[in-house]
């Protein structure tokens, strides 16, 4: 689906228009091959680069071709049906237009489209910075959600089981996906700050520098949560190993304690002549002997902290 948006400083709201004009924002969402061909023809875009935007696992990068600059980035995707925690987004900056192409719906654009977030499509640099700031903020909010979830598992460390471990592994996968998206994006953001890929005014450069810093802080935050998860997993593995060792030790002690009376009983249960077999108190003597041996073993095990 292709939608054309337009707003100048004089306009009171973001308008949907039907014709291409200077200062337009073209948002292409889940496009068909025919729609992509139309965009390529109308704006003289690079065919190969546009086709790359349809690869769900496309990595963030920056390219320049045929008078336009192509910014590949990714945004947080909270969709359990997808294999990745982020989705691709291509931003194209031309001389008189801004184009965004996404494979899926971009929830971060809803506030801009609804008018809740004020944007001016004719101010290309500021509009581009605003989009990237919204994406960075969405990453930060998603990390805050993950941090709270990880903290809940950390405070319940003693009761962590296989289900919690599986959930932590899922969080780790999401965070790695975010880091893989944020680091290359931050790299080309630093290049853009130098003003080589679009015209930036003094206040734009300052805003871009703040954006680079904010993006870097999000990366550090993601790595910090990853470190916390690794520590939780390490501690839980140590706890589970300790519990297993304790269980094996208890079972070993019980096996030894049960083996002694079984051996004695089996010896006196043989169908051969045995000493004291005719004695009146032999049975009670055997019971007492078993109790003495068991008591000695229990005392020995307690002395060595075996249970």
Image: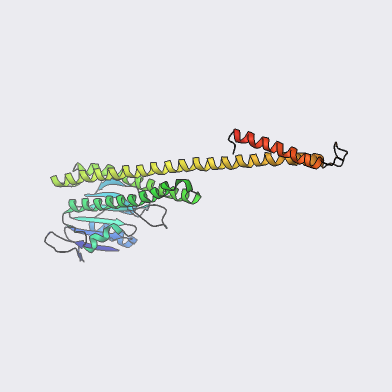
Looking at the image, residue 159 sits to the left or right of residue 250; the answer is: left
Q: Looking at the rendering, in which quadrant would you find the C terminus?
A: top right
Which residue occupies the extreme front position in the image?
280
Where in the figure is residue 153, as x and y percent of width and height?
A: 42, 49
Looking at the image, residue 270 sits to the left or right of residue 126; the answer is: right
Return the residue nearer the eye: 298 or 223.
Answer: 298
Return the residue nearer the eye: 202 or 252.
Answer: 252
Q: Looking at the rendering, in which quadrant would you find the N terminus?
A: bottom left
Looking at the image, residue 93 sits to the left or right of residue 284; the answer is: left
Q: How is the image coloured?
A: rainbow
Where in the figure is residue 248, as x and y percent of width and height?
A: 60, 41
Residue 201 can be seen in this image:
no
Residue 188 can be seen in this image:
yes
Residue at the image point whose x is 32% and y is 47% from the top = 60
Where in the figure is residue 305, as x and y percent of width and height?
A: 58, 35
State the image quarter where residue 31 is shown: bottom left
Residue at the image point whose x is 65% and y is 42% from the top = 254
Where in the figure is residue 302, as x and y percent of width and height?
A: 60, 36
Return the residue nearer the eye: 299 or 170.
Answer: 299
Looking at the image, residue 181 sits to the left or right of residue 19; the answer is: right
Which residue occupies the extreme left position in the image?
10
The mark total stands at 0
């Amino acid at each position: 689906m292709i939608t054309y948006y337009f707003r100048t400083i004089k306009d009171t709201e973001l308008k949907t228009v039907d014709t291409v004009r200077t200062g337009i924002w073209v948002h292409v969402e889940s496009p068909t091959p025919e729609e992509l061909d139309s965009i390529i023809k109308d704006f003289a875009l690079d065919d190969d680069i546009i086709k790359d935007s349809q690869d769900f696992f496309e990595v963030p990068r920056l390219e320049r071709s045929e008078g336009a600059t192509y910014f590949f980035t990714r945004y947080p995707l909270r969709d359990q049906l997808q294999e990745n925690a982020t989705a691709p987004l291509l931003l194209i900056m031309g001389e008189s237009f801004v184009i965004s192409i996404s494979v899926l719906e971009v929830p971060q654009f809803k506030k801009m489209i609804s008018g809740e977030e004020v944007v001016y499509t004719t101010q290309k640099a500021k509009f581009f910075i605003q989009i990237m700031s919204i994406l960075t903020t969405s990453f930060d909010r998603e990390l805050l959600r993950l941090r709270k979830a990880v903290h809940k598992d950390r405070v319940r460390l003693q009761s962590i089981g296989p289900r919690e471990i599986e959930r932590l592994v899922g969080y780790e996968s999401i965070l790695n996906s975010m880091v893989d998206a944020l680091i290359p994006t931050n790299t080309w953001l630093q290049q853009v700050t130098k003003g080589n890929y679009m015209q930036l005014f003094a206040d734009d450069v300052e805003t871009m520098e703040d954006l680079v810093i904010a993006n870097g802080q999000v990366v550090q935050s993601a790595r910090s949560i990853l470190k916390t998860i690794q520590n939780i997993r390490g501690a839980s593995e140590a706890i589970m190993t300790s519990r297993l060792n304790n269980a094996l030790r208890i079972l070993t002690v019980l096996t030894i304690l049960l083996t002694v009376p079984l051996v004695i009983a089996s010896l006196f249960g043989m169908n051969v002549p045995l000493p004291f077999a005719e004695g009146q108190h032999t049975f009670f003597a055997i019971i007492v002997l078993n109790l003495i041996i068991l008591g000695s073993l229990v005392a020995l095990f307690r002395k060595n902290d075996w249970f």
